[in-house]
Image (tube, grey):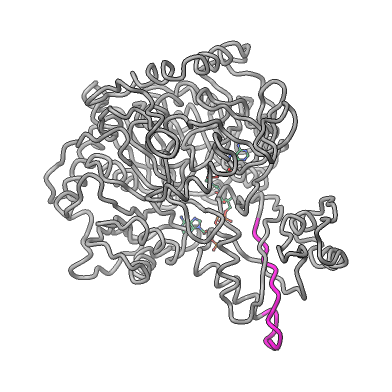
């Protein structure tokens, strides 16, 4: 398997020499209603649009074409749910029939091409069926992760303005049933936009009360519907909107188009993951995140592969061997998860005894992404599995890896701590503050030369200007990843940290700015800062530091408990905000900017330089005392 890098170098050079030719060739793997004549229109959109004259249907490519080519009896989705003790296989033929019926039900409720549908679902097959049913009609889905609170869901409903919401009655977390419907009702009440209809998938663990006139039982609606056919759309039409954390409380609506997405994802499966038709892929993430969109649902299905959809946790459902059991039982060839999941497994099964209980002979590689992977974790799992462990780097915005190691191109030697080399399609450079590419080996802001490749966001939902401000204004001609890192002499890219207020908690991307907005809304809080501090399991966890208004007499403990509750209620349990501290003052520059990066360094016990613009250097000593031992 370990080959020279020449195949990768040749593929990368071929793309550099002739990007249009590279993507024209990749586009041949997709079934088009009208094949692309033009590959890139550089004048359209904020930086260009891919396949501007082509037409296709993504659901046809993910489902119907495989039935037509004889894969109807093959498993499309294996739902493995240790949370319920159930395991079910859905063949491509069964998937086609369910998706067509649900699409028919949506159409009967007024959903057509371009209309939005919000999907608020746990890890059940209906989540994928919902996404595909929207794609079938040319409608635009927006999946919202179940761990968000009502206010976050409301913000997404208000922005996407869905005609219909598809939801389950509940999700299952270890030890508790999360009733989704009350959260959804609260979100709809908060949102100025109201959906016409809500279809509720009633789960046996907790059925939801349905509101007459608006809510309907999903299964009844699906059963009664006439199946709908695939509706061809323009390659540039949106397939989905996925909201992700920005630096403010208002999430960014990342848009994915139909054509570029299908081409890029299909291309990535063979090139990066080494997964082809009939192979089994297991991506342990959630359909609410980009990793779930791309590598639980779309890429495996566009490929005619089998995708394992797992409802459980890496540990405790029932034990730290659950991932290995899934791999063995379903003959998984490629597995993908976040480093935090591996750290959790390592914590519970440090000797890796549970691995030995399962036959992993068919597993060929483990892929890790979502956060920086610390080398000890990669080394531990690589020693245990004795298979390639591939760290690869990407973002919600890009939809597929910016960098990685490429099983379809002969792997180059892994270097733990690095996210591999740039994927063909991406010219990645570390830039200095003036936007000039730095010599190899020097750290800076990682940026991708425009145009971004197919599959990446063409813009933000109805917000071209916000797209420009967020991604292309700082370094004209480049997409700013807001990740800091280095590209070394041989092209290995190491991503070290974010350059903005985003933190990564257990592979989940969260905005400290959004948490600060919540803390600042507390009546006793005068000012605050939220920083991400090191956590040996989750990578980072948020820590809130608050200064109280003068005259506040309530006990600090009670105020901190309020703050923890507020963040859980407004952002959701996924924020993992469990720690707030009252401080007499915060370190600031003379112009009043809070020195968050310095606070983070102090909290993490790292060396720091006293910022020359600091208002009062003496405060840093105070902070060292307050923050001692907060990093775990
Ligand atoms: N619906 C409702 N609540 C949810 C949820 C969902 N879909 N997902 C998570 N939560 C809740 C959890 O129950 C937990 O609540 P608690 O504070 O009451 O315990 C909170 O959100 C934090 O959840 P999580 O981040 O999952 O932490 P954890 O402590 O429960 O588990 C890990 C730790 C490492 C096992 C877990 O984070 C994990 O599996 N991580 C994998 C990350 C991943 O797949 N990332 C996707 C990017 S690739
Ligand atoms: P998300 O949009 O939720 O996928 O989060 C994207 C962010 O996660 C990136 O901007 C990085 O900061 C971080 N990230 C993702 N994958 C990696 C990786 N392999 N190495 C380092 N950081 C990563």
Query: In the rendered structure, does residue 605 fall within the stretch colored magenta?
Result: no
Q: Is residue 69 left or right of residue 124?
A: left
Seen from the viewer's position, the closer of residues 352 and 476 is 476
Seen from the viewer's position, the closer of residues 561 and 22 is 22
Query: In the rendered structure, does residue 549 fall within the stretch colored magenta?
Result: yes
Q: Is residue 246 left or right of residue 40?
A: right
- Tell me: residue 42, above or below residue 247: above
Q: Position of residue 64 (x, y in %)?
A: 23, 30
Q: Position of residue 92 (x, y in %)?
A: 27, 32
Quarter holding the C terminus? bottom right
Seen from the viewer's position, the closer of residues 289 and 25 is 25
State how many labels appear. 0
- Tell me: residue 472, above or below residue 388: below
Residue at image location 82% in from the left, 55% down from the top: 611
Q: Is residue 605 left or right of residue 111?
A: right
Q: Position of residue 326 (x, y in %)?
A: 48, 37
Quarter holding the N terminus? top right
Q: Quadrant of residue 162?
A: bottom left
Residue at image location 61% in from the left, 32% down from the top: 391
Q: Position of residue 197 (x, y in %)?
A: 22, 61
- Tell me: residue 570, above or below residue 341: below
Residue at image location 66% in from the left, 49% down from the top: 539
Q: Quadrant of residue 615?
A: bottom right
- Tell me: residue 272, above or below residue 355: above
The residue segment tinted magenta is: 541-557
Residue at image location 43% in from the left, 39% down from the top: 46
Q: Quadrant of residue 198?
A: bottom left
């Amino acid at each position: 398997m370990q080959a020279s890098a020449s195949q990768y170098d040749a593929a990368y050079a071929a793309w550099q020499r002739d990007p249009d030719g590279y993507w024209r060739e990749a586009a041949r793997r997709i079934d088009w209603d009208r094949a692309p004549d033009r590959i890139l229109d550089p004048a359209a959109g904020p930086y260009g649009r891919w396949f501007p004259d082509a037409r296709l249907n993504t659901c046809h490519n993910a489902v119907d074409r495989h039935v037509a080519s004889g894969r109807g009896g093959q498993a499309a989705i294996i739902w493995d749910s240790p949370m319920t003790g159930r395991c079910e296989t859905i063949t491509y033929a069964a998937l086609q029939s369910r998706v067509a019926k649900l699409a028919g039900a949506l159409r009967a409720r007024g959903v057509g091409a371009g209309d939005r549908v919000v999907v608020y679902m746990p890890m059940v097959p209906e989540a994928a069926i919902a996404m595909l049913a929207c794609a079938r009609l040319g409608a635009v889905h927006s999946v919202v992760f179940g761990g968000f609170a009502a206010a976050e869901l409301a913000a997404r409903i208000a922005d996407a303005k869905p005609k219909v919401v598809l939801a389950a009655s509940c999700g299952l977390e270890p030890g508790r049933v999360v009733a989704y419907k009350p959260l959804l009702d609260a979100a709809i009440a908060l949102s100025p936009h109201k959906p016409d209809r809500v279809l509720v998938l009633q789960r046996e663990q907790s059925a939801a009360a349905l509101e007459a006139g608006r809510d309907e039982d999903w299964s009844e609606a699906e059963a009664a519907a006439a199946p709908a056919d695939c509706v061809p759309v323009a390659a540039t039409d949106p397939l989905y909107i996925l909201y992700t954390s920005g630096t403010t409380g208002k999430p960014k609506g990342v848009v994915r188009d139909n054509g570029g997405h299908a081409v890029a994802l299909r291309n990535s499966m063979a090139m990066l993951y080494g997964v082809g038709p009939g192979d089994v892929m297991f991506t342990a993430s959630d359909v609410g995140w980009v990793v779930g969109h791309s590598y639980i649902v779309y890429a495996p299905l566009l490929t005619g592969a089998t995708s394992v959809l797992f409802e459980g946790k890496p540990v405790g459902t029932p034990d730290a061997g659950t991932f290995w059991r899934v791999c063995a039982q379903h003959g998984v060839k490629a597995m993908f998860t976040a480093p935090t999941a591996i750290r959790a497994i390592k914590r519970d099964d440090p000797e890796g005894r549970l691995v030995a209980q399962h036959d992993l002979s068919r597993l060929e590689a483990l892929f890790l992404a979502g956060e920086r992977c610390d080398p000890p974790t990669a080394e531990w799992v690589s020693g245990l599995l004795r298979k390639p462990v591939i760290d690869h780097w990407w973002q919600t915005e890009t939809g597929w890896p910016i960098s990685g190691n490429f099983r379809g191109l002969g792997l180059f030697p892994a270097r733990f701590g690095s996210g591999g080399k740039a994927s063909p399609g991406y010219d990645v450079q570390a830039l200095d503050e003036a936007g000039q590419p730095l010599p190899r080996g020097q750290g800076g802001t990682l940026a991708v030369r425009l145009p971004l490749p197919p599959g990446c966001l063409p813009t933000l939902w109805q917000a071209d200007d916000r797209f420009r401000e967020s991604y292309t204004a700082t370094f004209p001609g480049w997409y700013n990843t807001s990740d800091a890192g280095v590209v070394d002499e041989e092209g290995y890219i190491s991503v070290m940290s974010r350059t903005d207020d985003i933190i990564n908690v257990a592979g989940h991307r969260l905005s400290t700015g959004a948490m600060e907005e919540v803390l600042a809304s507390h009546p006793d809080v005068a000012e605050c800062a939220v920083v991400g501090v090191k956590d040996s399991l989750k990578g980072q966890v948020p820590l809130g530091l608050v200064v109280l208004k003068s005259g506040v007499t309530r006990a600090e403990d009670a105020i901190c408990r309020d703050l923890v509750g507020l963040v859980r209620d407004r952002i959701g349990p996924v924020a993992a905000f469990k720690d707030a501290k009252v401080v007499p003052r915060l370190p600031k520059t003379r112009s009043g900017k809070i020195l968050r990066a310095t606070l983070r360094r102090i909290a993490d016990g790292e060396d720091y330089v006293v910022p020359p613009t600091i208002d009062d250097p003496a405060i840093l000593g105070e902070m060292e005392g307050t923050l001692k031992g907060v990093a775990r």
